[in-house]
Image (tube, grey):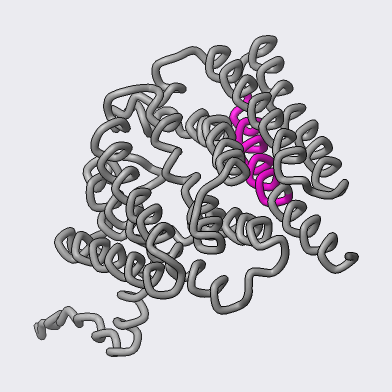
Amino acid sequence: MATVELVELSPAPRSAPRRAVTTIRAYVGLTKPRIIELLLVTTVPSMVLAAHGWPGWRLLTVTLVGGSLAAGSANSLNCYVDRDIDSVMNRTANRPLVTAAVPPNRALVFGAVLAVLATGTLSWGANLLAAALATAAIAFYVLVYTLGLKRRTSQNIVWGGAAGCAPVLVGWAAVTGRISLAPVILFAIVFFWTPPHFWALALRFREDYARAGVPMLPVVASDRTVTRAMAGYTVATVAVSLLLWPVAGTGWLYPVAATTLGAWFLQGALGLHRQTARTGLDRKAAMRLFHRSISYLTLLFVALAVDVLAGRWLR
């Protein structure tokens, strides 16, 4: 009786262009581009306010490129340091270092090269203060937050989130070459906004952080404690946002937008806390607040830029 020999066919190798595209996507993934987008949303209005109008396309482009490189560097180095915990969290299971799309040593070099490029770009195209602030933000995010705070304290994101506030300072410094009270208030807006924004996400993925041994507040505290803290930080965010009006001397559009958007954001935070206290945490509601927080910050800073530009054009 004749026998049939089964031959296992190996898959056809991917073409060089497809491999290149896959590799590029993996390196872009290391930089966490969606986070960079949100950071840039705060940079442009800060520059517009500092310039009392449009800061010019060249300076704007250089600052955005330098800021993107800096954020990409910090995020890539964060992926390198956190690759062990990323591998046990469902939310981060597809990151390039977890899937071995990028080797760890290359990710480390990539992050370092982006840091050098960011510093050089801002030094050449803006000024040394903007470059120094961006470099300090990278160091703070990697050394203080990722290596120092993230795995040691439930207040990690409160203080570590300061790195995400740096773009407003970088943008202001790029235009003026100095720091004054107005950019400090912009910094404070993002600083107080960060905990309710991130804790809303952490409530949804609490088991991920617990499995990874990361003591995010939702892991170590009750839901009521977390949502109460989120509401408190939201109140602080709204209060500080209104303080910018007399300090920066904006027109009427910004305070109206800050009040309206602040009430909307606060309603969401207080609503989540009341619901949690009454019937327990609704994770879908927590994620709705997470997305609302992104819309709030984006619309607030867009309103600031429109206020300044509209006032400039009307004068």
14 or 35, nearer to the observer: 35
Screen quadrant of the C terminus: bottom right
Pinpoint residue 146: horizontal percent, then vertical percent.
29, 40
Screen quadrant of the N terminus: bottom left
The reply to whether the magenta stretch includes residue 240 is: no
Q: At 33% across and 89% down in the image, what residue appears? A: 17
Q: Is residue 144 left or right of residue 171?
A: left
Q: Is residue 162 left or right of residue 275?
A: left
Secondary structure mostly taken by the magenta-highlighted segment of the chain: helix
| Residue 162 image-quadrant placement | top left
Pinpoint residue 60: horizontal percent, then vertical percent.
57, 71
Q: Is residue 225 left or right of residue 162?
A: right
Count of numbered badges drawn on the protein: 0
Q: At 25% across and 86% down in the image, what residue appears? A: 12
Pinpoint residue 140: horizontal percent, then vertical percent.
32, 43
Picture layout, residue 213 above or below residue 201: above
Picture layout, residue 212 above or below residue 92: above
Task: Specify the farthest residue to the right.
Answer: 314
Pinpoint residue 202: horizontal percent, then vertical percent.
48, 32
Q: Which residues are magenta?
A: 282-299
Q: At 66% across and 57% down in the image, what residue appears? A: 45
302 or 314, nearer to the observer: 314
The reply to whether the magenta stretch includes residue 288 is: yes
